[in-house]
Amino acid sequence: MQFNPPNLHNQHQSLCHAHNSARICLMWLHGVDENMGKSKKLLAAMSKRKRTYRNKWIIERVIADRQAQVQ
């Protein structure tokens, strides 16, 4: 029976690759999380602007209807 020493270099390379892949993935996820925060703020601002314009339209419509009733 012959003793075959484990190939430590290959194991080391494999572990380093897995570690680097995980680090890259975490960096990417951090960027995604940051971008999602920006997108959420942008969508909230757009929604507020839409509500503002809708409310403005409703008020203008009510005023126009009142003026039409007076005349």
Image (cartoon, grey):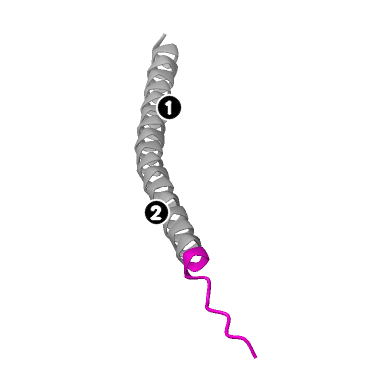
Image quadrant holding the N terminus, namely bottom right
What is the secondary structure assignment of the residue under circle 2? helix
Residue at image location 39% in from the left, 13% down from the top: 67
**Distance of mark 2 from mark 1, alpha carbons?**
46 Å
What is the secondary structure assignment of the residue under circle 1? helix
Residue in the foreground of this view, choosing between 53 and 15:
15
Residue 61 image point, x, y percent: 44, 20
Residue 5 image point, x, y percent: 53, 78
Q: In the shown orientation, is residue 3 left or right of residue 42?
A: right
Q: Which residue is mark 2?
A: 23
Query: Looking at the image, is 53 positioned above or below residue 36?
Result: above
Residue 57 image point, x, y percent: 42, 21
Q: Would residue 7 be counted in the magenta stretch?
A: yes
Label 2, residues with CA under 10 Å away: few <14, some 14-19, many ≥20: few
Q: Which residue is mark 1?
A: 54
Tally of numbered discs = 2
Q: In the shown orientation, is residue 1 left or right of residue 20?
A: right
